[in-house]
Amino acid sequence: MGRIVRMLTAPLLACAFLACATTGETRLAEIDAMASSAYTQGDMEQAERHYRQLVAAPGAGFEAWFRLGNILARANRVDEAVKMYEKTLELRADFAPAWRNLAVLRLRQGLAALLESQARLDTGDPLYADNQAIIEALRRAPAFGAAGDNL
C-alpha cells in the first residue's frame, strides 16, 4: 500500500507544481496586459506599478525594463531611469531605443552639470565661454526639443 501511495504522490505533486507555474505565468501575462494598457492610455502611475511587478518577477523581459525606464524618464526620475535602461541593455544589448534614451538622459545630466558649473563661474573665467558654447550646442540638439519627448 505504501508503495502505491508513493507512486501516486509524485505525479500528483508534479501536476500541482505545473498548475502553479501555469497560474503564475497567466498572472504575469495579465499584469503585462494591464501595464501595457495603462502605458498606452497615459496612466503612468498604474503602468509603473504594474511594470514594477513584472520586473520583480524572475525572467522579466527587456520590454518591461524599457517601459519602466520610459515612465521614470518622463517623471524626471533620471537616475532610476538610467538603471532601467542599463538593465534593458543587459538583457538585450542590440536594442537601439534603449541606447538612444540612455544617451539622451546622460546628455541631460551633462547639461544640468554644465549649468551648475556656469552658475558658479565668474563671466571673466575662460571656462565660462567654453561652458556657454557647450550649453548652447546641447540646447540646439533634438534631444532637448520635441524629439526629446519621445522617452
Image (cartoon, grey):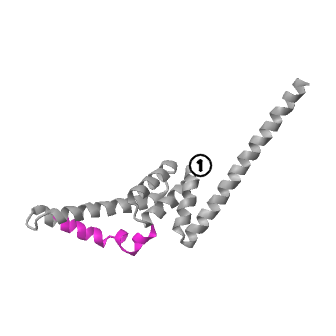
Q: Which residues are magenta?
A: 130-151
Q: State the residue position of label 1.
A: 57
For this view, does 45 lie left or right of residue 23? left
Q: Residue at x 82, y 35 (%)?
A: 11
Task: Choose top left, top right, bottom left or bottom right for residue 112.
Answer: bottom left
View extreme (bottom): residue: 146
> Quadrant location of the N terminus?
top right
For this view, does 118 lie left or right of residue 40? left
Q: Is residue 93 visible?
A: no
As for residue 54 lying within the magenta part, the answer is no
- Residue 29: horizontal and vertical position, in percent? 66, 57
View extreme (right): residue: 1
As for residue 137 lying within the magenta part, the answer is yes
- Residue 69: horizontal and vertical position, in percent? 47, 59
Q: Is residue 76 visible?
A: yes
Q: Is residue 11 above or below residue 129?
A: above
> Quadrant location of the C terminus?
bottom left
Q: How many marks?
A: 1
Foreground of the two, 110 or 4: 4
Name the chief secondary structure element in magenta. helix
Q: Residue at x 58, y 59 (%)?
A: 50
Q: Amino acid at mark 1?
A: Ala
For this view, does 27 lie left or right of residue 57? right
- Residue 70: horizontal and vertical position, in percent? 47, 63
- Residue 71: horizontal and vertical position, in percent? 48, 64
Foreground of the two, 34 or 65: 34
Callout 1 crowding tier (Cα within 10 Å): few <14, some 14–19, many ≥20: few
* Secondary-structure class at tag 1: loop
